[in-house]
Amino acid sequence: MKILELTNFSAGICGVWARVREEAERLSKKHEVVVFSSNFVKGNGDVRAKPEDRIGKVEIKRFKARKLGGESYMKWDFESVKSAVLEFKPDVIIAHSYRHKHTDFALDIGEKIGAKVFLVTHAPFVENDKTRSLLARIYLRFYYKKVVLKNIKKFNKVIAITKWEIPILEKLGVDKRKIEYIPNGIPELFFSQKKEKEENKILFLGRVAPVKNIETAIKAMRLVEDKKIKLEIVGPAEKDYLKKLTKLVKKHRLESRIVFSEGIFEIKEKIRKIDSCKIFVLPSKSEAMPQSLIEAMAREKIVIASDNKGAKELVENGKTGHLFRIGNSKELAGKINKVLSAKESEKIGDNAKKFVSQFSWDKIIKKIEGLI
């Protein structure tokens, strides 16, 4: 079977791309799989990736695109994409990220060639559109009413990566029989790799971008009672935001306790980095299904996350981790102090690992295979 995956990005650190890449590689063991995306690099402004690439058996083709507002909302060169699709002639098209132009394109071209078309939503239902620019919000609302609301009912299957978005999809008129819950997965290595030595450190691992609200963690460090523990912020950074954070560190005289490190792309190295911390923090304003959080939980780390929808679905406060109110640095510091002085931390880490075992990719891929 020929399978085409459509996604905005296939370069840079991106939660959607992490899903697409793993899914495509695993499906390629039994099928011919191709990934089409824009040529933008996620998290690097207008930096462009090379037009073609390959990961194992998976061929990647990237197309010119222009941004319509925000980082991810864009219009590809769909004439070129159309030609490439007609040449490949897929049996199944898996389009990632609801409310984007390439997912509507997938429906049109799928109907033309008689392919089944699945939508993987990636939980875009952001509260008050807080991560989007004004231009993106205005354009999205117009486009949403004219096109998107009608189209979502036309997909053969709508795959939700979270449970919290399923009632929203039903409210939009999607037939319950079309909705499938298939979350993002965790590579098996996260459950099996030998543990590394732990350091006296708190870790943030992910894109250093405004939506991650890292200033909350920086401000919390002022109130952490253990003045020897450090915060390491690891990930590719948006330049302007990084400048803002470094100024904040200097303002509070935390240079000796807060470290910025480059992004990590290799799985074994990422696992070693997670293993090196006592506490994993994720202070985001908004998350769909935070990959870094479930990866840290798989390594039995104590996770402390802001109480956005994505984190609340994964963390049971006090049992599999801890939650604090979004943007509340004082509350975050209190949670950190509690963890550092608590005796039940080992039990919480064990609970966390057991909970996220359901997300192991060997289980997730079977669900996807069952659909196609």
Image (tube, grey):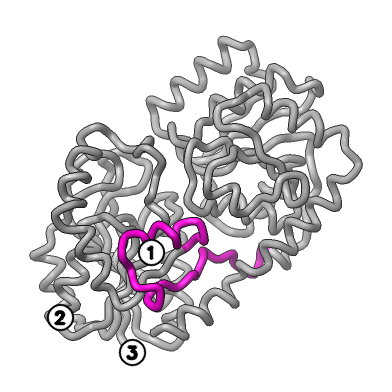
In contact (CB < 8 Å): disc 2 and disc 3: no
Q: Is residue 216 visible?
A: yes
Number of the label disc, if any, that sits on residue 170: 1
Q: What residue type is labelled 1?
A: Glu
Foreground label between 1 and 2: 1
Horizontal and vertical percent position of residue 46 = 25, 40
Q: Is residue 107 left or right of residue 21?
A: left
Inspect the magenta stretch and tell me whether residue 169 lies in it.
Answer: yes
Secondary structure of residue under mark 2? helix
Residue visible at 12% across and 70% down in the picture: 82
Q: Nearer the viewer, residue 348 or 1?
A: 348
Q: In this view, does 212 lie to the left or right of 192?
A: left
Q: Nearer the viewer, residue 72 or 250?
A: 72
Inspect the magenta stretch and tell me whether residue 371 lies in it.
Answer: no
Rounded to the nearest angstrom, the CA distance separating label 2 from label 3 is 15 Å
Horizontal and vertical percent position of residue 107 = 20, 71
Rounded to the nearest angstrom, the CA distance separating label 3 from label 1 is 30 Å
Q: Which amino acid does label 2 sit on?
A: Glu
Q: Is residue 351 left or right of residue 295?
A: right
Question: Measured along the vertical axis of the image, is residue 42 above or below residue 258?
Answer: below
Residue that label 3 marks: 1
Residue that label 2 marks: 87
Residue visible at 24% across and 32% down in the picture: 134
Range shown magenta? 161-190
Secondary structure of residue under mark 1? helix
Q: In which quarter of the image is the N terminus?
A: bottom left
Q: Quadrant of residue 266?
A: bottom right
Horizontal and vertical percent position of residue 208 = 48, 36
